[in-house]
């Protein structure tokens, strides 16, 4: 993997690990990024659970006047009830977050 590709993956990984919603519900155990397909496979130990649960996020980057945004277009889970809840909650919605400071600047150069 190229240095630029590695930086892109690190930006996505940092975003997931530091996102307030993820922290609120659990602790990230592992992350695997497939930047070619715009997916992030994340294993999260949800508060109160014994075993981690796997999630897959589908994302892309979008350049704006204010910087580079990461746009989450879909999230799925290996647990049926969580997957259904996510589908219901996210139906037709995307979540857009501007990458802060240096990460946003690097992402803008890379992408």
Image (cartoon, rainbow, N blue to C red):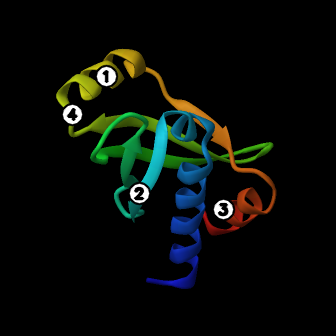
Residue 107 — which label?
3
State which tag comes first along the sequence, 4 or 2: 2
Label 2 to label 3, Cα distance in Å?
25 Å
Residue 79 — which label?
4
Residue furthest to the left: 80
Label 3 to label 4, Cα distance in Å?
32 Å
User: Which quarter of the figure has residue 87?
Assistant: top left
On the image, the x and y values in percent for residue 14 come to 59, 58
Left or right: 104, with 34 as reference point:
right
Q: Is mark 3 on a helix, strand or loop?
A: helix
Residue 98 — which label?
none
Q: Which residue occupies 40% across, 60% down?
A: 30
On the image, the x and y values in percent for residue 96 come to 60, 35
Q: Is mark 2 on a helix, strand or loop?
A: strand
- Of circles 3 and 4, the one toward us is 4
Q: Mark 1 points at which residue?
A: 87
Label 4 to label 2, Cα distance in Å?
17 Å
């Amino acid at each position: 993997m190229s240095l630029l590709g590695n930086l892109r993956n690190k930006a996505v990984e940092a975003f997931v690990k530091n996102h307030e919603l993820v922290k609120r519900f659990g602790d990230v155990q592992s992350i695997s990024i497939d930047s070619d397909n715009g997916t992030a496979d994340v294993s999260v130990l949800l508060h109160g659970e014994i075993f981690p649960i796997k999630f897959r996020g589908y994302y892309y980057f979008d350049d704006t006047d204010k910087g580079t945004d990461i746009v989450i277009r879909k999230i799925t889970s290996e647990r049926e009830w969580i997957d259904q809840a996510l589908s219901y909650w996210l139906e037709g919605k995307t979540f857009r977050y501007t990458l802060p400071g240096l990460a946003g600047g690097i992402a803008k150069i890379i992408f």
